[in-house]
Amino acid sequence: MLRLLGYLKTIKKSVVAAMIFAVISQLGSLVLPLMMSSIINNGIANGDIDYIKKMGLAMMGVSAVAVIIACFNSYYSSKTATSYGKILRRNIFLKVESLSQRDIDIVGTPSLITRCTNDVKVLQDFVIMGLRMIISAPIMLVGGVVMAFVMNPKLASVIFGVLPIIAVVVVIVLKVVMPLFKRRQKLVDSINRFIREKLTGIRVIRAFNRTEHEDERFRKQNIELSSLTLKFQRLMSVLIPVCIVIIIAALDLLIIFAAKNLDKMDIVTQREDLLNAIGNLQAFVIYMIMIVFSVTMAAAMFVIVPRARISANRIVQVLDIVPSITEPESPKTTDESKKGQVEFKNVTFRYTDGEDPILSDVSFTAEANKVTAIIGCTGSGKSSLVHLIPRFYDVTEGQVLFDGVDVRELSQKDLHSRIGYIPQKAFLFSGTIEDNLRYGDANATEEQLEKALEIAQCSEFVSNLEGGMKAFVSQNATNFSGGQKQRLSIARALARKAEVYIFDDSFSALDFKTDAALRKAIKENIDATVIIVAQRVGTILDADKIVVLEGGKIVGMGKHAELMKSCDVYKEIYSSQITEEDAQ
Protein backbone atom coordinates (compact mmCIF):
# COMPACT_ATOMS: atom_id res chain seq x y z
CA MET A 1 0.00 0.00 0.00
CA LEU A 2 2.87 2.37 0.79
CA ARG A 3 4.18 1.71 -2.70
CA LEU A 4 0.95 2.90 -4.28
CA LEU A 5 0.83 5.94 -2.02
CA GLY A 6 4.25 6.78 -3.43
CA TYR A 7 2.48 7.84 -6.63
CA LEU A 8 1.25 10.87 -4.68
CA LYS A 9 4.74 12.32 -5.13
CA THR A 10 3.83 13.16 -8.71
CA ILE A 11 1.03 15.45 -7.43
CA LYS A 12 2.77 16.60 -4.26
CA LYS A 13 1.71 20.26 -4.72
CA SER A 14 -1.95 19.34 -4.33
CA VAL A 15 -1.15 17.01 -1.41
CA VAL A 16 0.85 19.67 0.43
CA ALA A 17 -1.83 22.30 -0.20
CA ALA A 18 -4.56 20.03 1.17
CA MET A 19 -2.48 19.22 4.27
CA ILE A 20 -1.64 22.87 4.97
CA PHE A 21 -5.26 23.96 4.67
CA ALA A 22 -6.32 21.07 6.94
CA VAL A 23 -3.85 22.13 9.63
CA ILE A 24 -4.84 25.81 9.50
CA SER A 25 -8.54 24.92 9.60
CA GLN A 26 -8.15 22.80 12.75
CA LEU A 27 -5.92 25.34 14.52
CA GLY A 28 -8.70 27.87 14.04
CA SER A 29 -11.16 25.44 15.60
CA LEU A 30 -8.95 25.17 18.70
CA VAL A 31 -8.91 28.94 19.18
CA LEU A 32 -12.69 29.47 19.09
CA PRO A 33 -13.53 27.80 22.47
CA LEU A 34 -10.94 29.99 24.20
CA MET A 35 -12.46 33.10 22.64
CA MET A 36 -15.92 32.03 23.79
CA SER A 37 -14.63 31.40 27.31
CA SER A 38 -12.98 34.83 27.28
CA ILE A 39 -16.28 36.50 26.33
CA ILE A 40 -18.04 34.86 29.27
CA ASN A 41 -15.23 35.37 31.77
CA ASN A 42 -14.21 38.91 30.81
CA GLY A 43 -17.07 40.40 28.86
CA ILE A 44 -20.24 39.07 30.47
CA ALA A 45 -18.71 38.85 33.97
CA ASN A 46 -17.66 42.52 33.84
CA GLY A 47 -20.60 43.77 31.80
CA ASP A 48 -18.17 45.04 29.14
CA ILE A 49 -20.33 45.33 25.99
CA ASP A 50 -17.49 46.68 23.89
CA TYR A 51 -15.33 43.69 24.75
CA ILE A 52 -18.18 41.31 23.90
CA LYS A 53 -18.67 43.02 20.51
CA LYS A 54 -14.96 43.06 19.81
CA MET A 55 -14.46 39.38 20.65
CA GLY A 56 -17.70 38.42 18.88
CA LEU A 57 -16.51 40.05 15.66
CA ALA A 58 -13.15 38.34 16.10
CA MET A 59 -14.90 34.96 16.48
CA MET A 60 -16.94 35.64 13.34
CA GLY A 61 -13.75 36.50 11.48
CA VAL A 62 -11.95 33.35 12.66
CA SER A 63 -15.00 31.23 11.77
CA ALA A 64 -15.25 32.77 8.29
CA VAL A 65 -11.56 32.16 7.63
CA ALA A 66 -11.92 28.57 8.93
CA VAL A 67 -14.83 27.95 6.54
CA ILE A 68 -12.87 29.33 3.57
CA ILE A 69 -9.80 27.28 4.51
CA ALA A 70 -11.99 24.15 4.88
CA CYS A 71 -13.37 24.76 1.35
CA PHE A 72 -9.81 24.96 0.00
CA ASN A 73 -8.94 21.76 1.86
CA SER A 74 -11.96 20.03 0.35
CA TYR A 75 -11.06 21.28 -3.15
CA TYR A 76 -7.43 20.15 -3.01
CA SER A 77 -8.36 16.84 -1.38
CA SER A 78 -10.80 16.09 -4.20
CA LYS A 79 -8.30 17.21 -6.82
CA THR A 80 -5.59 15.02 -5.30
CA ALA A 81 -7.84 11.95 -5.10
CA THR A 82 -9.05 12.40 -8.69
CA SER A 83 -5.51 12.83 -10.02
CA TYR A 84 -4.35 9.85 -7.96
CA GLY A 85 -7.11 7.67 -9.42
CA LYS A 86 -6.12 8.77 -12.92
CA ILE A 87 -2.49 7.83 -12.28
CA LEU A 88 -3.42 4.41 -10.87
CA ARG A 89 -5.77 3.58 -13.74
CA ARG A 90 -3.16 4.61 -16.28
CA ASN A 91 -0.45 2.50 -14.65
CA ILE A 92 -2.75 -0.53 -14.47
CA PHE A 93 -3.82 -0.06 -18.10
CA LEU A 94 -0.22 0.29 -19.32
CA LYS A 95 0.75 -2.79 -17.32
CA VAL A 96 -2.10 -4.83 -18.78
CA GLU A 97 -1.07 -3.71 -22.29
CA SER A 98 2.41 -5.10 -21.65
CA LEU A 99 1.07 -8.51 -20.57
CA SER A 100 0.78 -11.47 -22.86
CA GLN A 101 -2.47 -13.31 -23.39
CA ARG A 102 -1.15 -16.00 -21.06
CA ASP A 103 -0.66 -13.46 -18.25
CA ILE A 104 -4.13 -12.00 -18.76
CA ASP A 105 -5.66 -15.47 -18.69
CA ILE A 106 -4.11 -16.12 -15.26
CA VAL A 107 -5.66 -13.03 -13.63
CA GLY A 108 -8.86 -13.00 -15.66
CA THR A 109 -10.36 -10.17 -17.67
CA PRO A 110 -13.29 -9.53 -15.27
CA SER A 111 -10.91 -9.28 -12.31
CA LEU A 112 -8.68 -6.84 -14.21
CA ILE A 113 -11.69 -4.64 -14.93
CA THR A 114 -12.72 -4.71 -11.25
CA ARG A 115 -9.21 -3.80 -10.12
CA CYS A 116 -9.05 -0.91 -12.58
CA THR A 117 -12.41 0.49 -11.45
CA ASN A 118 -13.74 -0.67 -8.08
CA ASP A 119 -10.37 -1.10 -6.34
CA VAL A 120 -9.07 2.22 -7.65
CA LYS A 121 -12.25 3.91 -6.36
CA VAL A 122 -11.61 2.45 -2.89
CA LEU A 123 -8.11 3.95 -2.89
CA GLN A 124 -9.45 7.27 -4.13
CA ASP A 125 -11.89 7.33 -1.20
CA PHE A 126 -9.01 6.53 1.13
CA VAL A 127 -6.91 9.43 -0.18
CA ILE A 128 -9.71 11.99 -0.03
CA MET A 129 -10.78 10.91 3.45
CA GLY A 130 -7.17 10.70 4.55
CA LEU A 131 -6.39 14.27 3.52
CA ARG A 132 -9.51 15.45 5.33
CA MET A 133 -9.30 13.22 8.41
CA ILE A 134 -5.78 11.90 8.95
CA ILE A 135 -4.56 15.49 9.35
CA SER A 136 -7.64 16.80 11.14
CA ALA A 137 -8.23 13.97 13.62
CA PRO A 138 -4.79 14.05 15.33
CA ILE A 139 -4.85 17.85 15.61
CA MET A 140 -8.34 17.81 17.11
CA LEU A 141 -7.49 14.91 19.42
CA VAL A 142 -4.11 16.19 20.64
CA GLY A 143 -5.22 19.82 20.72
CA GLY A 144 -8.45 18.99 22.52
CA VAL A 145 -6.69 16.83 25.11
CA VAL A 146 -3.96 19.42 25.74
CA MET A 147 -6.42 22.28 26.12
CA ALA A 148 -8.70 20.18 28.33
CA PHE A 149 -5.75 19.29 30.60
CA VAL A 150 -4.71 22.92 30.78
CA MET A 151 -8.19 23.89 31.96
CA ASN A 152 -8.80 20.95 34.36
CA PRO A 153 -6.30 18.05 34.51
CA LYS A 154 -8.44 16.01 36.90
CA LEU A 155 -11.52 15.99 34.68
CA ALA A 156 -9.56 15.58 31.45
CA SER A 157 -7.74 12.49 32.74
CA VAL A 158 -11.01 10.55 32.52
CA ILE A 159 -10.66 10.48 28.71
CA PHE A 160 -7.74 8.05 29.01
CA GLY A 161 -10.01 5.60 30.76
CA VAL A 162 -12.30 5.23 27.74
CA LEU A 163 -9.69 5.13 24.95
CA PRO A 164 -8.59 1.50 25.73
CA ILE A 165 -12.26 0.44 25.61
CA ILE A 166 -12.63 2.02 22.16
CA ALA A 167 -9.41 0.33 20.98
CA VAL A 168 -10.74 -3.09 22.02
CA VAL A 169 -14.03 -2.50 20.16
CA VAL A 170 -12.16 -1.44 17.00
CA VAL A 171 -9.88 -4.49 17.03
CA ILE A 172 -12.77 -6.93 17.52
CA VAL A 173 -14.81 -5.42 14.69
CA LEU A 174 -11.85 -5.36 12.28
CA LYS A 175 -10.98 -8.99 13.02
CA VAL A 176 -14.43 -9.99 11.86
CA VAL A 177 -14.72 -7.53 8.96
CA MET A 178 -11.42 -8.06 7.12
CA PRO A 179 -12.19 -11.60 5.87
CA LEU A 180 -15.66 -10.43 4.81
CA PHE A 181 -14.25 -7.63 2.68
CA LYS A 182 -11.76 -9.95 0.96
CA ARG A 183 -14.58 -12.32 0.11
CA ARG A 184 -16.72 -9.41 -1.08
CA GLN A 185 -14.08 -8.27 -3.60
CA LYS A 186 -13.90 -11.79 -5.03
CA LEU A 187 -17.68 -11.82 -5.38
CA VAL A 188 -17.49 -8.50 -7.24
CA ASP A 189 -15.05 -10.14 -9.67
CA SER A 190 -17.42 -13.09 -10.03
CA ILE A 191 -20.54 -11.04 -10.72
CA ASN A 192 -18.60 -8.85 -13.16
CA ARG A 193 -17.56 -11.98 -15.05
CA PHE A 194 -21.13 -13.30 -14.96
CA ILE A 195 -22.63 -10.06 -16.34
CA ARG A 196 -20.05 -9.78 -19.15
CA GLU A 197 -20.71 -13.36 -20.19
CA LYS A 198 -24.48 -12.97 -20.19
CA LEU A 199 -24.45 -9.70 -22.11
CA THR A 200 -22.17 -11.23 -24.72
CA GLY A 201 -24.33 -14.34 -25.01
CA ILE A 202 -27.73 -12.64 -24.78
CA ARG A 203 -28.79 -13.91 -28.22
CA VAL A 204 -27.97 -17.50 -27.31
CA ILE A 205 -29.86 -17.16 -24.02
CA ARG A 206 -32.96 -15.92 -25.81
CA ALA A 207 -32.68 -18.44 -28.65
CA PHE A 208 -32.74 -21.33 -26.18
CA ASN A 209 -35.42 -19.78 -23.92
CA ARG A 210 -33.03 -19.75 -20.96
CA THR A 211 -33.85 -16.22 -19.82
CA GLU A 212 -35.58 -17.33 -16.62
CA HIS A 213 -32.81 -19.81 -15.84
CA GLU A 214 -30.12 -17.13 -16.24
CA ASP A 215 -32.22 -14.65 -14.24
CA GLU A 216 -32.32 -17.13 -11.38
CA ARG A 217 -28.55 -17.70 -11.55
CA PHE A 218 -27.93 -13.96 -11.49
CA ARG A 219 -30.41 -13.52 -8.63
CA LYS A 220 -28.50 -16.03 -6.50
CA GLN A 221 -25.14 -14.36 -7.13
CA ASN A 222 -26.64 -10.91 -6.60
CA ILE A 223 -28.26 -11.95 -3.31
CA GLU A 224 -25.00 -13.49 -2.11
CA LEU A 225 -23.11 -10.27 -2.83
CA SER A 226 -25.85 -8.09 -1.33
CA SER A 227 -26.10 -10.23 1.82
CA LEU A 228 -22.36 -10.17 2.35
CA THR A 229 -22.24 -6.40 1.79
CA LEU A 230 -25.10 -5.85 4.25
CA LYS A 231 -23.36 -8.00 6.84
CA PHE A 232 -20.16 -6.03 6.28
CA GLN A 233 -21.95 -2.68 6.55
CA ARG A 234 -23.90 -3.73 9.66
CA LEU A 235 -20.70 -4.65 11.46
CA MET A 236 -18.97 -1.45 10.41
CA SER A 237 -22.01 0.64 11.33
CA VAL A 238 -21.69 -0.63 14.91
CA LEU A 239 -18.16 0.72 15.31
CA ILE A 240 -18.69 4.49 15.12
CA PRO A 241 -21.90 4.62 17.24
CA VAL A 242 -20.29 2.51 19.97
CA CYS A 243 -17.27 4.82 20.07
CA ILE A 244 -19.52 7.88 20.24
CA VAL A 245 -21.70 6.39 22.99
CA ILE A 246 -18.63 5.60 25.11
CA ILE A 247 -17.22 9.12 24.72
CA ILE A 248 -20.58 10.84 25.25
CA ALA A 249 -21.19 8.75 28.37
CA ALA A 250 -17.84 9.92 29.74
CA LEU A 251 -18.68 13.49 28.79
CA ASP A 252 -22.06 13.29 30.57
CA LEU A 253 -20.38 12.10 33.74
CA LEU A 254 -17.94 15.02 33.55
CA ILE A 255 -20.76 17.55 33.11
CA ILE A 256 -22.73 16.06 36.02
CA PHE A 257 -19.65 16.23 38.22
CA ALA A 258 -18.98 19.85 37.20
CA ALA A 259 -22.62 20.81 37.71
CA LYS A 260 -22.58 19.47 41.27
CA ASN A 261 -19.54 21.65 42.05
CA LEU A 262 -21.27 24.70 40.60
CA ASP A 263 -24.36 24.08 42.74
CA LYS A 264 -22.22 24.44 45.89
CA MET A 265 -21.25 28.06 44.99
CA ASP A 266 -22.90 31.11 46.52
CA ILE A 267 -24.34 32.79 43.44
CA VAL A 268 -24.78 36.16 45.20
CA THR A 269 -21.29 36.48 46.67
CA GLN A 270 -19.40 34.55 44.01
CA ARG A 271 -21.12 35.70 40.82
CA GLU A 272 -17.84 36.50 39.06
CA ASP A 273 -16.30 33.17 40.05
CA LEU A 274 -19.44 31.40 38.88
CA LEU A 275 -19.31 33.07 35.47
CA ASN A 276 -15.63 32.21 35.16
CA ALA A 277 -16.44 28.62 36.02
CA ILE A 278 -19.25 28.50 33.48
CA GLY A 279 -17.02 30.00 30.79
CA ASN A 280 -14.26 27.52 31.50
CA LEU A 281 -16.76 24.65 31.63
CA GLN A 282 -18.22 25.77 28.30
CA ALA A 283 -14.77 25.72 26.69
CA PHE A 284 -13.94 22.43 28.40
CA VAL A 285 -17.10 20.78 27.05
CA ILE A 286 -16.34 22.02 23.52
CA TYR A 287 -12.84 20.56 23.72
CA MET A 288 -14.30 17.29 24.91
CA ILE A 289 -16.72 17.34 21.96
CA MET A 290 -13.75 17.92 19.66
CA ILE A 291 -12.13 14.84 21.19
CA VAL A 292 -15.37 12.92 20.49
CA PHE A 293 -15.35 14.00 16.84
CA SER A 294 -11.66 13.16 16.43
CA VAL A 295 -12.22 9.67 17.85
CA THR A 296 -15.22 9.28 15.53
CA MET A 297 -13.11 10.25 12.53
CA ALA A 298 -10.39 7.85 13.67
CA ALA A 299 -12.98 5.07 13.86
CA ALA A 300 -14.11 5.95 10.32
CA MET A 301 -10.51 5.66 9.15
CA PHE A 302 -10.34 2.21 10.74
CA VAL A 303 -13.17 1.30 8.36
CA ILE A 304 -11.47 2.74 5.26
CA VAL A 305 -7.85 1.66 5.85
CA PRO A 306 -8.42 -2.14 5.80
CA ARG A 307 -10.52 -1.87 2.63
CA ALA A 308 -7.87 0.31 1.01
CA ARG A 309 -5.13 -2.14 1.98
CA ILE A 310 -6.95 -5.08 0.40
CA SER A 311 -7.65 -3.11 -2.79
CA ALA A 312 -4.05 -1.90 -2.86
CA ASN A 313 -2.79 -5.49 -2.61
CA ARG A 314 -5.02 -6.50 -5.53
CA ILE A 315 -3.66 -3.65 -7.65
CA VAL A 316 -0.06 -4.39 -6.66
CA GLN A 317 -0.58 -8.02 -7.72
CA VAL A 318 -1.26 -6.75 -11.24
CA LEU A 319 1.59 -4.23 -11.25
CA ASP A 320 4.01 -6.89 -9.97
CA ILE A 321 3.22 -9.42 -12.68
CA VAL A 322 6.39 -10.20 -14.60
CA PRO A 323 5.31 -10.49 -18.25
CA SER A 324 6.00 -13.93 -19.61
CA ILE A 325 6.76 -12.33 -22.97
CA THR A 326 9.43 -9.66 -22.72
CA GLU A 327 11.48 -7.53 -25.05
CA PRO A 328 14.96 -8.87 -25.86
CA GLU A 329 17.83 -6.95 -24.30
CA SER A 330 19.53 -6.56 -27.69
CA PRO A 331 16.94 -6.90 -30.47
CA LYS A 332 18.25 -8.37 -33.70
CA THR A 333 17.55 -7.15 -37.19
CA THR A 334 15.90 -9.37 -39.74
CA ASP A 335 17.69 -11.14 -42.59
CA GLU A 336 16.70 -9.33 -45.80
CA SER A 337 17.52 -12.41 -47.85
CA LYS A 338 14.72 -14.26 -45.99
CA LYS A 339 12.22 -11.40 -46.00
CA GLY A 340 8.65 -12.67 -45.64
CA GLN A 341 9.70 -16.20 -44.63
CA VAL A 342 8.16 -17.81 -41.53
CA GLU A 343 9.70 -21.03 -40.26
CA PHE A 344 8.63 -23.37 -37.47
CA LYS A 345 11.43 -25.53 -36.06
CA ASN A 346 10.45 -28.46 -33.83
CA VAL A 347 7.80 -26.34 -32.11
CA THR A 348 6.03 -27.72 -29.05
CA PHE A 349 3.49 -25.59 -27.19
CA ARG A 350 1.22 -26.04 -24.20
CA TYR A 351 -0.97 -23.55 -22.33
CA THR A 352 -0.13 -22.60 -18.74
CA ASP A 353 -2.66 -24.90 -17.09
CA GLY A 354 -2.54 -27.58 -19.75
CA GLU A 355 -1.00 -30.94 -19.06
CA ASP A 356 -0.80 -32.13 -22.64
CA PRO A 357 0.83 -30.05 -25.41
CA ILE A 358 -1.44 -28.39 -27.98
CA LEU A 359 1.33 -28.64 -30.59
CA SER A 360 4.03 -31.29 -30.75
CA ASP A 361 7.26 -31.14 -32.79
CA VAL A 362 5.80 -28.98 -35.57
CA SER A 363 8.24 -28.07 -38.37
CA PHE A 364 7.47 -26.37 -41.68
CA THR A 365 8.29 -23.21 -43.63
CA ALA A 366 5.90 -20.62 -45.05
CA GLU A 367 7.82 -19.42 -48.09
CA ALA A 368 8.04 -15.73 -48.90
CA ASN A 369 5.35 -14.31 -51.21
CA LYS A 370 3.46 -17.59 -51.30
CA VAL A 371 0.22 -18.86 -49.79
CA THR A 372 0.54 -21.37 -46.97
CA ALA A 373 -2.67 -22.92 -45.67
CA ILE A 374 -3.24 -24.71 -42.37
CA ILE A 375 -6.19 -27.05 -42.07
CA GLY A 376 -7.34 -29.66 -39.61
CA CYS A 377 -10.21 -30.79 -37.48
CA THR A 378 -11.53 -28.65 -34.64
CA GLY A 379 -9.05 -28.61 -31.75
CA SER A 380 -6.08 -29.65 -33.86
CA GLY A 381 -4.10 -26.52 -32.85
CA LYS A 382 -4.44 -24.36 -36.00
CA SER A 383 -5.12 -21.03 -34.25
CA SER A 384 -2.62 -21.80 -31.49
CA LEU A 385 0.00 -22.32 -34.18
CA VAL A 386 -0.44 -18.91 -35.86
CA HIS A 387 -0.68 -17.15 -32.47
CA LEU A 388 2.98 -18.02 -31.97
CA ILE A 389 4.05 -15.87 -34.94
CA PRO A 390 3.13 -12.44 -33.45
CA ARG A 391 4.12 -13.75 -29.99
CA PHE A 392 0.68 -13.76 -28.41
CA TYR A 393 2.22 -16.80 -26.73
CA ASP A 394 5.78 -18.11 -26.71
CA VAL A 395 6.74 -21.62 -27.70
CA THR A 396 7.37 -24.17 -24.97
CA GLU A 397 10.07 -25.82 -27.05
CA GLY A 398 11.59 -25.14 -30.45
CA GLN A 399 11.71 -21.92 -32.47
CA VAL A 400 9.54 -19.70 -34.65
CA LEU A 401 11.70 -17.80 -37.13
CA PHE A 402 10.50 -14.63 -38.81
CA ASP A 403 12.69 -13.34 -41.65
CA GLY A 404 15.33 -15.79 -40.45
CA VAL A 405 15.36 -14.56 -36.82
CA ASP A 406 13.74 -16.11 -33.74
CA VAL A 407 10.67 -13.98 -32.92
CA ARG A 408 11.85 -13.85 -29.29
CA GLU A 409 14.94 -11.96 -30.44
CA LEU A 410 12.99 -9.32 -32.37
CA SER A 411 11.52 -6.14 -30.98
CA GLN A 412 7.77 -6.70 -30.60
CA LYS A 413 7.06 -3.34 -32.20
CA ASP A 414 9.23 -4.25 -35.18
CA LEU A 415 7.67 -7.73 -35.42
CA HIS A 416 4.09 -6.48 -35.27
CA SER A 417 4.76 -3.74 -37.82
CA ARG A 418 5.62 -6.45 -40.36
CA ILE A 419 2.45 -8.50 -39.78
CA GLY A 420 -1.14 -8.01 -40.88
CA TYR A 421 -3.28 -10.09 -38.53
CA ILE A 422 -6.97 -10.93 -38.95
CA PRO A 423 -8.38 -12.66 -35.82
CA GLN A 424 -10.67 -15.64 -35.85
CA LYS A 425 -13.44 -13.64 -34.19
CA ALA A 426 -14.01 -10.44 -36.17
CA PHE A 427 -13.67 -7.43 -33.90
CA LEU A 428 -14.25 -3.76 -34.70
CA PHE A 429 -13.84 -0.75 -32.43
CA SER A 430 -16.63 1.74 -31.91
CA GLY A 431 -16.19 4.86 -34.04
CA THR A 432 -16.24 4.97 -37.84
CA ILE A 433 -15.21 2.55 -40.57
CA GLU A 434 -12.31 4.85 -41.41
CA ASP A 435 -11.12 4.84 -37.77
CA ASN A 436 -11.03 1.06 -37.86
CA LEU A 437 -9.18 0.93 -41.16
CA ARG A 438 -6.55 3.33 -39.85
CA TYR A 439 -5.75 0.89 -37.04
CA GLY A 440 -3.88 -0.92 -39.77
CA ASP A 441 -2.00 2.20 -40.86
CA ALA A 442 -2.67 5.56 -39.22
CA ASN A 443 -1.00 7.36 -42.14
CA ALA A 444 -2.74 5.48 -44.93
CA THR A 445 -4.05 7.60 -47.81
CA GLU A 446 -7.67 7.60 -48.96
CA GLU A 447 -6.58 5.58 -52.00
CA GLN A 448 -5.00 2.93 -49.77
CA LEU A 449 -8.13 2.63 -47.66
CA GLU A 450 -10.36 2.39 -50.72
CA LYS A 451 -8.07 -0.24 -52.22
CA ALA A 452 -8.18 -2.28 -48.99
CA LEU A 453 -11.98 -2.12 -49.03
CA GLU A 454 -12.03 -3.19 -52.66
CA ILE A 455 -9.78 -6.21 -52.10
CA ALA A 456 -11.79 -7.23 -49.01
CA GLN A 457 -15.02 -7.06 -51.05
CA CYS A 458 -16.36 -4.23 -48.88
CA SER A 459 -16.64 -1.42 -51.45
CA GLU A 460 -20.21 -2.11 -52.46
CA PHE A 461 -21.86 -2.22 -49.04
CA VAL A 462 -19.67 0.58 -47.62
CA SER A 463 -20.55 2.91 -50.51
CA ASN A 464 -24.25 2.27 -49.84
CA LEU A 465 -23.92 3.36 -46.21
CA GLU A 466 -24.73 6.92 -45.22
CA GLY A 467 -21.37 8.65 -44.98
CA GLY A 468 -19.45 5.82 -46.66
CA MET A 469 -16.19 5.31 -44.76
CA LYS A 470 -17.45 7.85 -42.21
CA ALA A 471 -20.34 5.53 -41.33
CA PHE A 472 -20.73 4.86 -37.61
CA VAL A 473 -19.60 1.58 -36.05
CA SER A 474 -21.40 0.77 -32.81
CA GLN A 475 -19.84 -1.03 -29.85
CA ASN A 476 -18.98 -4.58 -30.91
CA ALA A 477 -20.14 -3.54 -34.41
CA THR A 478 -23.65 -4.76 -33.73
CA ASN A 479 -24.93 -2.65 -36.65
CA PHE A 480 -23.09 -4.91 -39.12
CA SER A 481 -23.63 -8.53 -40.08
CA GLY A 482 -21.07 -11.23 -39.31
CA GLY A 483 -19.83 -11.30 -42.90
CA GLN A 484 -19.52 -7.51 -43.06
CA LYS A 485 -17.55 -7.41 -39.82
CA GLN A 486 -15.23 -10.12 -41.08
CA ARG A 487 -14.57 -8.34 -44.36
CA LEU A 488 -13.93 -5.02 -42.59
CA SER A 489 -11.46 -6.80 -40.28
CA ILE A 490 -9.69 -8.12 -43.36
CA ALA A 491 -9.67 -4.64 -44.93
CA ARG A 492 -8.13 -3.21 -41.75
CA ALA A 493 -5.18 -5.62 -42.04
CA LEU A 494 -4.81 -5.08 -45.80
CA ALA A 495 -4.60 -1.32 -45.28
CA ARG A 496 -1.17 -2.00 -43.80
CA LYS A 497 1.71 -2.81 -46.12
CA ALA A 498 2.89 -5.93 -44.32
CA GLU A 499 5.37 -8.69 -45.13
CA VAL A 500 3.13 -11.44 -43.78
CA TYR A 501 -0.66 -11.62 -43.59
CA ILE A 502 -2.21 -14.10 -41.17
CA PHE A 503 -5.84 -15.07 -41.79
CA ASP A 504 -6.96 -16.96 -38.68
CA ASP A 505 -10.05 -18.71 -40.06
CA SER A 506 -11.12 -15.28 -41.35
CA PHE A 507 -13.33 -16.54 -44.21
CA SER A 508 -15.75 -18.64 -42.14
CA ALA A 509 -18.61 -16.09 -42.27
CA LEU A 510 -18.31 -15.56 -46.02
CA ASP A 511 -20.32 -17.32 -48.69
CA PHE A 512 -18.35 -19.34 -51.26
CA LYS A 513 -18.71 -16.72 -53.98
CA THR A 514 -17.39 -13.88 -51.81
CA ASP A 515 -14.69 -16.18 -50.42
CA ALA A 516 -13.45 -17.00 -53.92
CA ALA A 517 -13.58 -13.36 -55.07
CA LEU A 518 -11.67 -12.18 -51.98
CA ARG A 519 -8.93 -14.81 -52.33
CA LYS A 520 -8.57 -13.96 -56.02
CA ALA A 521 -8.22 -10.25 -55.22
CA ILE A 522 -5.61 -11.00 -52.55
CA LYS A 523 -3.60 -13.13 -54.95
CA GLU A 524 -3.68 -10.45 -57.67
CA ASN A 525 -3.02 -7.41 -55.47
CA ILE A 526 -1.03 -8.52 -52.43
CA ASP A 527 2.68 -9.16 -52.87
CA ALA A 528 3.39 -10.75 -49.48
CA THR A 529 3.43 -14.03 -47.60
CA VAL A 530 -0.08 -15.23 -46.82
CA ILE A 531 -0.84 -17.76 -44.09
CA ILE A 532 -4.44 -18.98 -44.03
CA VAL A 533 -6.06 -21.00 -41.26
CA ALA A 534 -9.20 -22.58 -42.65
CA GLN A 535 -11.93 -25.08 -41.92
CA ARG A 536 -13.14 -25.30 -45.51
CA VAL A 537 -11.14 -27.11 -48.16
CA GLY A 538 -12.54 -24.83 -50.86
CA THR A 539 -10.71 -21.87 -49.29
CA ILE A 540 -7.28 -23.46 -49.65
CA LEU A 541 -7.42 -25.58 -52.82
CA ASP A 542 -5.07 -23.26 -54.72
CA ALA A 543 -2.59 -22.72 -51.86
CA ASP A 544 1.11 -23.20 -52.63
CA LYS A 545 1.46 -25.35 -49.51
CA ILE A 546 -1.13 -27.00 -47.29
CA VAL A 547 -0.19 -28.11 -43.78
CA VAL A 548 -2.58 -30.67 -42.28
CA LEU A 549 -2.78 -30.87 -38.48
CA GLU A 550 -4.23 -33.66 -36.40
CA GLY A 551 -3.94 -33.69 -32.61
CA GLY A 552 -1.32 -30.93 -32.69
CA LYS A 553 0.97 -32.82 -35.09
CA ILE A 554 1.61 -32.46 -38.80
CA VAL A 555 0.14 -35.45 -40.61
CA GLY A 556 0.45 -34.13 -44.12
CA MET A 557 2.08 -31.36 -46.13
CA GLY A 558 2.00 -30.39 -49.79
CA LYS A 559 -0.39 -29.18 -52.48
CA HIS A 560 -3.98 -30.31 -52.83
CA ALA A 561 -3.27 -32.98 -55.45
CA GLU A 562 -0.37 -34.42 -53.46
CA LEU A 563 -2.37 -34.58 -50.22
CA MET A 564 -5.28 -36.30 -51.94
CA LYS A 565 -2.88 -39.15 -52.69
CA SER A 566 -0.82 -39.24 -49.51
CA CYS A 567 -2.87 -37.89 -46.55
CA ASP A 568 -5.90 -39.81 -45.26
CA VAL A 569 -6.92 -37.01 -42.84
CA TYR A 570 -6.99 -34.47 -45.68
CA LYS A 571 -8.98 -36.84 -47.88
CA GLU A 572 -11.55 -37.29 -45.11
CA ILE A 573 -11.91 -33.54 -44.66
CA TYR A 574 -12.21 -33.08 -48.42
CA SER A 575 -14.78 -35.84 -48.89
CA SER A 576 -16.90 -34.53 -45.99
CA GLN A 577 -17.12 -31.07 -47.59
CA ILE A 578 -16.95 -31.50 -51.36
CA THR A 579 -20.62 -32.46 -51.78
CA GLU A 580 -21.73 -29.37 -49.90
CA GLU A 581 -19.41 -27.12 -51.89
CA ASP A 582 -20.51 -28.61 -55.21
CA ALA A 583 -24.09 -27.97 -54.20
CA GLN A 584 -23.25 -24.33 -53.83
Image (cartoon, rainbow, N blue to C red):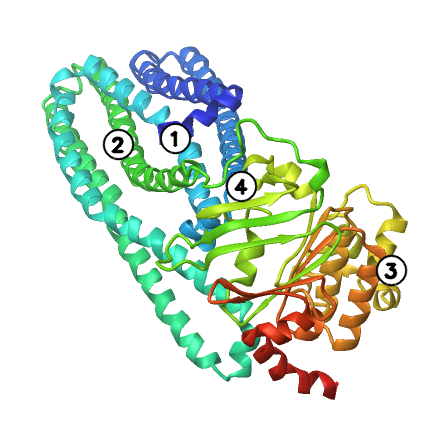
Q: Amino acid at mark 1?
A: Gly
Q: CA distance from mark 1 to mark 4?
A: 25 Å
Q: Which disc number belongs to residue 467?
A: 3
Q: CA distance from mark 2 to mark 1?
A: 14 Å
* Mark 2 or mark 4: whose residue is earlier in sequence: 4
As drawn, is 173 to the left or to the right of 216?
Answer: left
Instruction: Give the quarter of the figure containing the C terminus.
Output: bottom right
* Mark 3 or mark 2: whose residue is earlier in sequence: 2
Residue designated by label 1: 130
Q: CA distance from mark 3 to mark 1?
A: 52 Å
Of badges 3 and 2, the one in the foreground is: 3
Of badges 3 and 1, the one in the foreground is: 3
Residue designated by label 4: 93
Residue 553 percent location from the top left of the image = 49, 62
Q: Which class describes the residues within 10 Å of circle 2: few (<14), some (14-19), or many (20+)?
A: many
Asked whether 529 or 411 is in front, the reply is 529
Q: Which class describes the residues within 10 Å of circle 3: few (<14), some (14-19), or many (20+)?
A: few
Residue designated by label 2: 295
From this view, report whether residue 141 is shown above or below residue 252. above
Q: Amino acid at mark 4?
A: Phe
* Mark 4 or mark 3: whose residue is earlier in sequence: 4
* Mark 3 or mark 1: whose residue is earlier in sequence: 1
Q: Are marks 2 and 1 in contact (CB under 8 Å)?
A: no
